[in-house]
Image: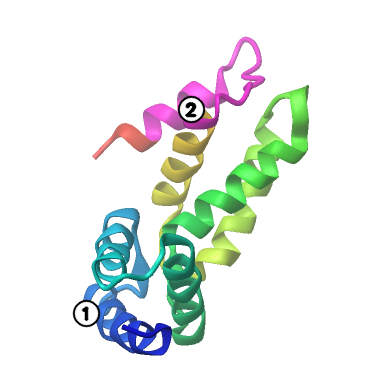
Amino acid sequence: MSLDAIQDRFIDEIKLRGYDDQYIDKNEEREILQIAIQQGIGIDAARAALAEVCSKLGYSLESDLLKLVKDQFDSAGSVGINRASFEAVLAKLRTAADGRRDDRELRKLIVHAIEDGGFKVNSGWPFNWYRAVKREISRA
């Protein structure tokens, strides 16, 4: 299957999965990429095609948002993440997500990136703002 044909297939798959919120989470992204791999398209080419189609249709990819968070915290270096840098990244995510995710979901995404990336958090004393954020996102 050619790359153009797989992009056409991606359009259908993206519209099917992201119809209600115009957002493709990591599970939906994995399912779509598996379709391309089954058709003989390499993973890098499939990801590039998926990103291109999502951009063209105005859909957001969760993996792009996670990459944005990790890039922001990588640039902070060994200084650590304080409340101000956390809120700055949250503001950038709000813009990137374009209203497709609420603040609670975006905070959860940031905390997930912090813990997976092993970033240092300057939580402060006596009030641990990071623990408060984690407690807030764990509530139903």
Residue annotated with mark 2:
115
The magenta stretch spans residue 107: no
Identify the residue at image location x=38%, y=84%.
7
Label 2 CA crowd tier, 10 Å (few <14, some 14–19, many 20+): few
Identify the residue at image location x=63%, y=39%.
86
The magenta stretch spans residue 133: yes
The percent position of residue 83, horizontal first and vertical second, equals 66, 32
Amino acid on which disc 1 is placed: Leu
The percent position of residue 93, horizontal first and vertical second, equals 57, 57
Secondary structure beneath label 2: helix
Amino acid on which disc 2 is placed: Glu
Say if 137 sits above or below 22 in the image.
Answer: above
The earlier-in-sequence mark between 1 and 2 is: 1
Identify the residue at image location x=26%, y=62%.
34
Which of the two residues, 130 or 72, is positioned nearer the viewer here? 72
Per the rendering, the mark at residue 16 is 1
